[in-house]
Image: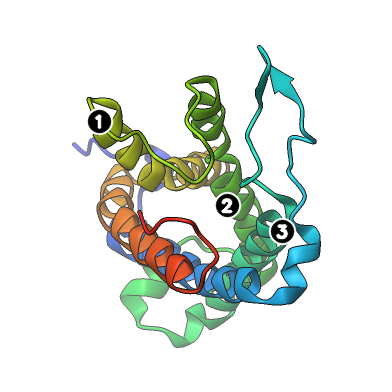
């Protein structure tokens, strides 16, 4: 007797995780190149519209439309490409991932990209309410490791929750993505810091 959710039967957890990681690695590269370009600067408008709660900014100056404008379509394009390539990829991968058309994969990627970006907002809200300045981290106490972990996980959790709303998601896929995702997220943070886009590398 299997303990897997009925809708997840037939899915290969590793194949699903690999698809997600590869898609978001590609989207992350597009995102980094866009943020580095001078063209993106004109869209550096805070998504909170300078709104405040208890006299403190909702999300802060670092959460702008320029990231959202590219990450969402880039994720959609990456999912679409992988969906189109599925028939040409190894059988274990093609048969172990969701049996959707490339268009459906593209729409799923758009939703996942939105979840990725939206996942950062609760963390930003909490830090603003704790008077932690945008682009900085707590320097001492329990808040420092907690903030480090949240900064690595918030967008990944948002993306995985978004995907889980629309498609069956094997539990081990969550484990694989949450294990590998933070390391990739850290590497992209370091890349953006090296490019002068971020104020800190972690």
Residue 33 in the figure: left or right of residue 160? right
Which residue is found at the position 67% from the left and 77% from the top?
Answer: 37
Quadrant into which the N terminus falls: top left
**Comes first in the chain, label 2 or label 1:** 2
Work out whether 106 lies above or below 64.
below
**Comes first in the chain, label 3 or label 1:** 3
Q: Secondary structure at mark 2?
A: helix
Of 87 and 179, which appears nearest the observer? 179
Of 151 and 164, which appears nearest the observer? 151
Work out whether 200 lies above or below 18.
above
Which residue is found at the position 49% from the left and 46% from the top?
Answer: 135
Of 141 and 84, which appears nearest the observer? 141
Which residue is found at the position 35% from the left and 49% from the top?
Answer: 9
Crowd tier of the residue under label 3, counting other residues whose Cα lies within 10 Å: few below 14, some 14–19, many 20 or above: many
How far apart are the alpha carbons under marks 2 and 3?
Answer: 17 Å
* Residue 154: % across, % down: 44, 40
Work out whether 57 lies above or below 76.
above
- Can the viewer see residue 16 in this picture? no
Residue under label 2, please give it. Answer: 112
* Residue 106: % across, % down: 66, 65
**Comes first in the chain, label 2 or label 3:** 3
**Disc number for residue 66:** 3
Nearest to viewer (mark 3 / mark 1) = 1
Residue 119 in the figure: left or right of residue 38? left
Residue under label 1, please give it. Answer: 140
* Residue 166: % across, % down: 58, 43
């Amino acid at each position: 007797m299997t303990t897997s959710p009925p809708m997840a039967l037939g899915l290969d957890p590793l194949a699903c995780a690999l698809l997600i990681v590869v898609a978001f690695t590609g989207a992350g590269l597009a995102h980094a190149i866009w943020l580095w370009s001078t063209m993106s600067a004109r869209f550096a408008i805070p998504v909170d519209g300078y709104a405040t709660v208890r006299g403190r900014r909702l999300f802060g100056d670092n959460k702008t439309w320029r990231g959202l404008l590219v990450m969402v379509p880039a994720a959609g394009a990456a999912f679409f490409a992988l969906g189109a390539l599925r028939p040409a990829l190894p059988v274990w991968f093609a048969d172990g991932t969701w049996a959707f058309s490339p268009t459906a994969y593209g729409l799923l990627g758009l939703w996942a990209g939105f979840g990725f970006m939206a996942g950062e907002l609760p963390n930003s809200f909490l830090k603003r309410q704790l008077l932690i300045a945008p682009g900085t981290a707590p320097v001492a106490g329990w808040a420092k490791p907690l903030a480090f972990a949240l900064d690595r996980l918030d967008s990944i959790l948002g993306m995985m929750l978004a995907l889980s709303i629309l498609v069956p998601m094997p539990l081990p896929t969550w484990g694989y993505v949450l294990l590998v995702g933070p390391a990739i997220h850290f590497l992209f943070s370091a890349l953006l810091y090296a490019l002068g886009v971020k104020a800190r590398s972690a």
